[in-house]
Image (cartoon, rainbow, N blue to C red):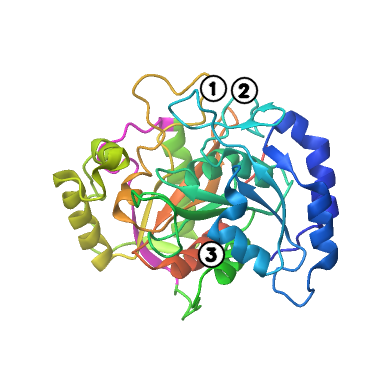
Amino acid sequence: MTGWWTVGEALERIDRRDPELCAFIEVWHARALERAHAVDRQLPLAGLPFAVKGPTGIRSYAARRLIAAGAVPVGSTAVPGPETYWQTWGRGAHGRTVNPYRADRTPGGSSAGSAVAVAAGLVPLATGSDGAGSVRIPAAWCGVFGLKTTRGLLPSPDRTGLATAGVLTRRVADARAYLRCVLDGYEEGPRVRAPVPATYSPDLGFARTDPAVEAVVRGAVDRLVAAGVVRPAAGAGSPLSLLDPREAWLAARGGAGLDVGAVREENDRRLDAYFARTPLLLTPVTPNRPHGHEGPGVDVYSTALTWAFNLSGHPAASLPAGFTPDGCPVGLQLVAARGADVSLLDIASAAEEALPVMRP
């Protein structure tokens, strides 16, 4: 891990800043300090303070594995309230969760509090889960790193198969430490050699991407090419185009399961063909920038560029790409072949070094 702070320091930061940010539902002061005092210092994450997503996060598989590795849970983070259908904000103990860069905007969700807690420096790592973009969207809108793992890589209680375990961190190296501790049989393997062949799609063929968001992400991709991290895939031709997965995702979430007909089958076919020849796909994380707390607007889907990969099961990550002129963070989405989570972290780490984001 990259120089984390102590449990006591994390608790002090939460007490001082959370009344403004509203990132936490509960903070476990006494229990966290007790754990920190008793932890075996030989464990790989000994004394690392971390947060868990939502009121049930402490019972998740990932939380149990982190605790076994010596990490110390300090509290549970905000998730959306029951009165909103679009699920992109949170409600903490002190009120509505706010974006740490623009309090008038949502932090994204549903891992809202986890992203805010990491972005504001309250904890270095927080667990999340991602069923339509619930790790990647708040990571993008709060300017942190977020990883959605390959479907089936880690246990998930989601019977639809859409939601997979994820993590939000300040640095890619911290996400690697998370995966190393929670994944049985973790293997580094040979490091990915740069430049990595990739293609960039601003809209996956169907989304209406905000020009300001697209400009930030395209600029980040150009910098990765110039730095030798990625290169245009040979013979890539037109950017990858998918069918809009909205109805297929809604059907799967509604109980139809993942075998939901022609759209999903065709998108899987196109993605399988793509990753058979190209190891990396780059897109914006969201087609829009963070919206106000009243909602995204009619027929605006912040999930438009993320939920296809919940249906397909591919690992995907959000890496900070920069800011729009009005100060909204933007994320670059990196998608890899199923099971290539470790390689995806290799690429993201190299990309992180090439994209030093100037924060307002």
Q: Secondary structure at mark 1?
A: loop
Residue drawn where x is 63% and y is 62% of the image? 174
Amino acid residing under circle 2: Asp
- The C terminus sits in image quarter: top right
Residue drawn where x is 23% and y is 46% of the image? 241
Tag in front: 3 or 2? 2
Residue drawn where x is 30% and y is 49% of the image? 311
Specify whether residue 207 is painted magenta.
yes
Q: Which residue is mark 1?
A: 292
Q: Which residue is mark 2?
A: 104
Q: Is residue 211 visible?
A: yes
Residue drawn where x is 31% and y is 46% of the image? 308
Q: Secondary structure at mark 2?
A: loop
Residue 9 in the image, given as x and y percentages of width and height: 84, 51
Rate crowding at label 3 as few (under 14), some (14 to 19) or many (20 or more) other CA atoms within 10 Å: some
Amino acid residing under circle 3: Ala
Label 3 to label 1: alpha-carbon separation? 33 Å
Q: Which residues are magenta?
A: 194-211
Label 3 to label 2: alpha-carbon separation? 33 Å
Q: Secondary structure at mark 3?
A: helix
- Residue 43 is drawn in which quadrant? bottom right
| Prevailing secondary structure of the magenta residues | loop
Q: Are marks 2 and 1 in contact (CB under 8 Å)?
A: yes
